[in-house]
Amino acid sequence: MNKFFLVAGIVLSVGPFFLMGDKLDAYRVQQHGRVVWMEVIDIPSSFLANGKFMKVEYNKKIFLKKVGRSFCEAHAVGDVVEFKYLAGAENILLPNESVIGQFISMALIVLVGMYCVFKGLKKDT
């Protein structure tokens, strides 16, 4: 059982760092981006999963944004929608969207992973 905790702990402790680059990009957009108008060029028509990606265009560059059903029901292709944008960033955010919660979630996962590593290293008595 200790080997299971050790392996699971290592995966949980290291895994979130692979996602960190994308989240840091989104955080830079949140902190330094400006609100711009982008045109919707494609929007999901069905929702079999929790969310789908829509396509928006700004300055001849296409961005993908994961959106929910209510967002898609309120918008259509050709609509112009506000997004937070930072030149050079791959991510766009809704004007009031925050990524701080995702950093907190990743930190909690790392903490659980560290607990599992320590539990896995602990000798049975």
Image (spheres, helix red, strand yellow):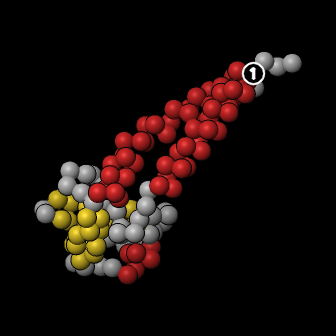
Q: Is residue 80 above or below residue 92?
A: below
From the viewer's perspective, is 109 left or right of 92? right
Q: Residues within 10 Å of mark 1 (few under 14, many from 20)?
A: few
Residue 112: % across, % down: 64, 39
Q: Quadrant of residue 96?
A: bottom left
Q: Quadrant of the C terminus?
A: top right
Which residue reaches farthest left?
60
Residue assigned mark 1 = 122
Which residue reaches farthest bottom?
74
Q: Is residue 22 visible?
A: yes
Q: Quadrant of the N terminus?
A: top right
Residue 95: % across, % down: 35, 69
Q: Is residue 103 above or below residue 97?
A: above
* Residue at 37% in and 52% down: 27
113 or 11: which is nearer to us?
113
Q: Amino acid at mark 1?
A: Lys
69 or 5: which is nearer to us?
5
